[in-house]
Amino acid sequence: MILRLSFIIFFLNASSLAQTAEEIITKAENAIKGKTAKGFVSMTVKTPDYERTLKMENWWIGNEKALIVIKSPKKEAGNKTLKIGNEMWNYLRNTGTTIKIPPSMMLQSWNGSDFTNDDLVRESNLNEDYFIRLIGSEAVEGNNCWKIELTPKPDAPVVWGKLEYWVSKQEILPVRVNYYDENSKLVRHMLFSENKKFSGRIIPSRWMMINDLKKDHITSFILEDMAFDVVISDNIFSFRELERGD
């Protein structure tokens, strides 16, 4: 009887942990995304050879639609990226050409950064594409965190073999994400820091991607001004808007 009761308690606890892991991921992702979002972001790419900064205006509707417009430097101002569903296009203002990005290039660098095309258009939906498991607690960057493992579901359209995701227990915000390839090799990791208030919500304002395959290759996103859960016209996510000169 005691053994049976212990088994039942263990089973219930395990089920609760699995559900809790999904809830934690959902809350952390929703905090930094919102149903819709628009704002201004700067991106700085650092390598041993150079450093460059882009300033951008962005619009998002969940994981379904995105438009990113480069505002500076002057040489790249007017270049745009549009994502609708599973399709993505880049518009180059200097040549007036629109290029469709095939699925095979989603893992390639976006504008020479350590972020991929997939990152910039939020292609993956973690709860839909991954099995999610709470595997422990750790202190990361001074935060007491849950550590969560995400492994791809069969036939999920994802590019990573595994993710490790740390979420702060106090704020329920992302702190670190590790990205592994199909051979369980760490490819890169992202750190979230400098929490600030935007649209009444406190979220990390600095997202730093560190390349673990290329030494001293780091890309930082700084959220300068963001508004969440706002009304965004569908006209924003159109070829007319994509190819409109600014």
Image (spheres, grey):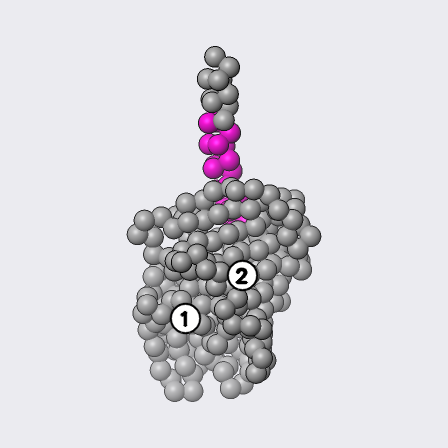
Q: Tag 2's secondary structure?
A: strand
Q: Amino acid at mark 1?
A: Gln
Q: Residue furthest right?
A: 142
Q: Is residue 41 something one can see in this rendering?
A: no
102 drawn magenta: no
Judge whether 40 appears above or below 176 on screen: below
**Quarter occupied by residue 44:** bottom right
User: Total label count?
Assistant: 2
Q: Residues within 10 Å of mark 1 (few under 14, many from 20)?
A: some
Q: Position of residue 147 (x, y in %)?
A: 55, 46
The range drawn in magenta is: 11-30
The front one of 202 and 106 is 106
State the residue position of label 2. Answer: 189
Residue 180: give x, y in percent of width and height. 45, 58
Q: Is residue 21 magenta?
A: yes
Q: How far apart in space, not on screen, are marks 1 and 2 (Cα)? A: 16 Å
Q: Position of residue 223 (x, y in %)?
A: 60, 65
What is the magenta segment's predominant secondary structure? helix
Residue at 35 percent of width and 82 percent of height: 97
How crowded is the residue under tag 2: few (<14 C-alpha within 10 Å), some, or many (20+)?
many
Visible residue check, residue 184: yes
- Marking on residue 147: none
* Amino acid type, mark 2: His
Q: Secondary structure at mark 1?
A: loop
Residue drawn 36% across the image and 70% down it = 105
Residue that mark 1 sits on? 108
Q: Is residue 233 above or below residue 155?
A: below
